[in-house]
Amino acid sequence: MSDLDAYRAKASAWLQSMAPTFGRDARKGLSEADDLALGRRYQKAKFDAGYAGINWPTEYGGQGLSHLEKVTFDAEEMKHGFPSFYFGISLGMPVPVLMQFGSDKEFVKERVLKALQGEEIWCQLFSEPSGGSDLAGLRTKAEPEGNGWKINGQKVWTSWAHYSDYGVIVVRTDPTVAKHKGLTYFWVDMKAPGVTVRPIKLAGGDSHVNEVFFDDVKITDDHRMSPVGGGFAVAIATLMIERYVATDSAGFGPHLDLFVELAKDVQLNGRPAIEDGRIRQQIARNHAMRAGLDSINVRARLMMQAGMMPGPEGSLNKLVAVRSRQKLSELALDLQGHDGFLFDEHASQKEDWASSWINAPTGRIAGGSDETLLNTIAEKVLGLPQDHRPDKGIPFNQIPA
Amino acid sequence: MTILYDEGQQAIATESRRVLEARVDKDALLPLLEAVGEYHRPFWDTAKEQGWTALALPEAEGGLGLGLIELGLIAHQAGRSISGAPFLTSGFGAAKAIELFGSDAQKARWLPGLASGETIGAIAFAAGPDALPARPDVTFTDDKLDGTARGVSGGLAADVAIVFANGPGMPVLALADLAGTQRSAIPSFDNSRLIADIGFIGTPAETLAVGGAARDAALHILALQAVVTAHEQTGGAEALMEIARDYALTRKAFGQPIGAFQSVKHRIAELYGLVELARANCIHAAAREGAADFITAAAAARLSATEAYDTAARDCIQIHGGIGVTWEIGLHLHMRRARSLAIEQGSSLFWEDVLVDQLAGEAA
């Protein structure tokens, strides 16, 4: 047994021992507040057991292990339905960026330890009504005031902002230069005067994303995490960290086994649906696609294990998996016919076809839309030309709105 | 359990690519389309000389003792070059059938020649649309074959065939020396495949497997060939994706390279996805030879590779516009090959059924 297999076995055993207290069944029927409280206890239990900050430096309370142990643990953890998603963004991007770019080391260490133990949550204030895929098009501004800054504007799609204690934010500090050059990266206290968080209810019934308004929010210059005008590079560094989060060839929807079971149970024109050629074709094609992604991901892990950088084909994961999840979920609802109308907005997207279907569009947009991902593959992997960009090199305040 | 190619394997890929790019070009392949019964002899001479025919056969039988992974790498390069002979896959399948299910005498009689490439093998399992029929057209009675095996790739030049035949009340996997059989060439949209009807009239044959074992054996051989073919298809799809990319970078319209239009660049990015999924499934399937889920892995590789090659052929020509459909630019060579390979080892319809049977726990 390799070291990694041993690690996996140990992690799996620990996770199984936690499942009765924190797993899927324990969470059934909880209000969101109670679920979050349970999540905080689970995060603390992970920290105490040495499974928080697995690949983070030990001086910040991490375990100092590699990315491999981290993805190994994540893959095992995903099986139990733990309430860990409240901390996904927080520990995924903002806190690692704080470790890398925060200037006051004592302050950083205190924040990191509290975040790792589930006591504090961080959010990432990037997207705006006019700056989503075009991140550098954002308009929220910070103006110098005294020895600090004053922030005004609006962010949107901010996950978990309503539970967050702190956030990292990119704002415009100079509108007279080209759009990428006038941005600066700060952290903010989400409880500061002038910060208003307004949850957005999504189609699937969830409200984990928010609009966040900044009205004369004052921060001192020690909140700055990039050179003035150098915020875009730090924002890109944040998004690079995002590339290596756990993958799921089911597109974070139901496993194909569940579809096969459904097709065996349901009758179509008097015969089990599993005998219907249209259904068989979709099962076979979905399997082939998912098996391909699984193989790509296994190879990426093997490469990392061998000290190499994985190839760019990992960029296919979300694009291919979520799109196919959406269509397979539609077909699953077709198969159930009138029995498929029943909808429970709290059902798991990984187990319930209606929930998987109604939430699938979010997956095709968040973290880069299909179109953005296709552009990235075309431009960065295949070397095709960039889109026409009329705003290139023009001072931000002269770009036609 | 996907693998990472080691240095030796990467060297096989690089060397076979170098050799094929030097010796195969479209101008040599185009005339083959207009003649029935011709194939690209320089390709086959290269295959023999480079030891590709021996590669995945045991050393005791004159082979090199490597495996499906290495043969797959060669097939990938052959696919890029649109290999002008059908024997790499079917010859391998015939040799594996004899190696796995044959007697010592049969191995001694046939394997050294198949390994050296001096003997050409073919597989005759299909009956019309069915890649592995419940009741094959060819009958096997008293050690003799009768009937016609239709549309056998490489059949026109083969010396020996592995035939899936209808024996007394059960299927038989039989080995037949083709000397003395009646062969008629089938004019095809991909003529260099040497597709032929093989007529058996009391042709002496030997059994390799009988009954359920014959069907299992035939499916296993078909799966081995499918994995090799899937590599070939992926190589073809990859080449087309690169051709499309290069053309989109140079061809201009409305004052910019057409690759700057999202309708074009996204089409090529989608091809990248299909090629990489097919490649990943091929690597996985080749590494699963001998494992319990080999048929599942082979089917997945086959399905994704067929989709990749067909789609790449369609889209690459579409991106080229009018020039893409001309005889001399040769994209139709890939388009034809994509279709003939899609049919040869069992179509997608066949492999979809095989795969769902495996997934639903209803494996034959």
Image (cartoon, rainbow, N blue to C red):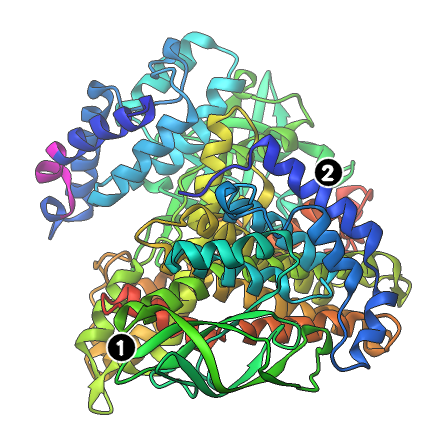
Closer to us: A310 or A247: A310
Closer to us: A321 or B324: B324
Location of the N terminus of chain A by quadrant is top left
* Residue A274 marker: 1
Q: How far across and how far down the image is residue A74, in percent?
A: 32, 36
Q: How far across and how far down the image is residue A320, in percent?
A: 49, 58
> Which portion, as a residue range, is magenta?
A17-24
- Image quadrant in which you'd find residue B260: bottom right
Answer yes or no: is residue A322 visible: no
Distance Cα–Cα, label 1 vs label 2: 60 Å
Closer to us: A76 or B182: B182
Q: Earlier in the sequence, mark 1 or mark 2?
A: 2
Answer yes or no: is residue A51 visible: yes
Could you tell whether A280 is left or right of B191 in the image? left
Q: Secondary structure at mark 2?
A: loop
Foreground tag (1 vs 2): 1
Residue found 62% across the figure and 82% down from its top: B196
**Residue highlighted by disc 2:** A175
Amino acid type, residue under disc 1 in the picture? Ile
Closer to us: A85 or B327: B327
- Image quadrant in which you'd find residue A111: top left
Amino acid type, residue under disc 2 in the picture? Pro
| Chain assignment, label 1 | A
Location of the C terminus of chain A by quadrant is bottom right
